[in-house]
Image: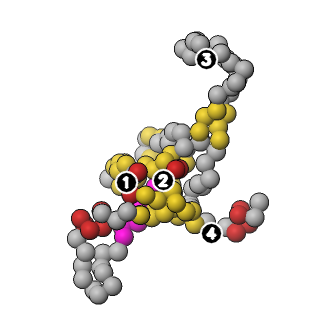
Amino acid sequence: MKSKNKQILVVGDRVLIRPDLGEKKSKAGLYLPPSVIEKQEILSGVIVEVGPGIPLGNPEESVDEPWSTNSSSPVKYIPTQADIGDVALFLNKASIEVKIENDDYLIVPQSAILILIRDDLEELTK
């Protein structure tokens, strides 16, 4: 994700989510205070950036000296299932709030995402 003069890179199997603000009113028409909305166990939001995934180690390399990086092989990843633009339902307890240029975002690990909602049906059938 690019902002004014910075590039935001998400690492590992994490995703950056623009959260939905939630319901401000109850079904009876009462306005809910922010403390009630914050206590919800499951939140939703739109994914705006996705990390590369879980890095895989090369089984042929020695683990004895991890600081010696003479390896020329590129890092390989297990990619995340989430894509930019998906709507995610995720566990609130696992999310971390960040503010980037006056916008609120949540960083969520892929393991905390319960369901992804994607508009493109052709992607699901691949």
Q: Which residue is mark 2?
A: 112
**From where the camera sits, is residue 16 visible?**
no
Label 1 is placed on what type of residue?
Answer: Lys
Position of 33 compared to 81: left or right? left
Q: Nearer the viewer, mark 2 or mark 4?
A: 2
Query: Which of marks 4 and 2 precedes in the sequence?
Result: 2
Count residues near mark 2 (Cα–Cα under 10 Å), then give few for <14, some for 14-19, many for 20+.
some
Q: Which residue is mark 1?
A: 93
In this view, 79 is above or below 29: above
Q: Which residue is mark 4?
A: 119
The answer to whether mark 4 and mark 3 are in CB contact below 8 A is: no
Cα–Cα span, label 2 and label 3: 30 Å
* Rendered location of residue 48, percent (x, y): 51, 55
The answer to whether mark 1 and mark 4 are in CB contact below 8 A is: no
Q: Residue at x 55, y 63 (%)?
A: 115
Q: Residue at x 75, y 64 (%)?
A: 125
Label 4 is placed on what type of residue?
Answer: Asp
Q: Residue furthest bottom?
A: 28
Return the residue nearer the eye: 67 or 100: 67
Q: Which residue is mark 3?
A: 63
Query: Which of marks 3 and 4 precedes in the sequence?
Result: 3
Cα–Cα span, label 1 and label 3: 34 Å
Cα–Cα span, label 4 and label 3: 43 Å
Cα–Cα span, label 1 and label 4: 27 Å
* Rendered location of residue 75, percent (x, y): 65, 29
The answer to whether mark 1 and mark 3 are in CB contact below 8 A is: no
Task: Provide the residue span drawn in magenta.
Answer: 17-22
Query: Which of marks 3 and 2 precedes in the sequence?
Result: 3
Count residues near mark 3 (Cα–Cα under 10 Å), then give few for <14, some for 14-19, many for 20+.
few
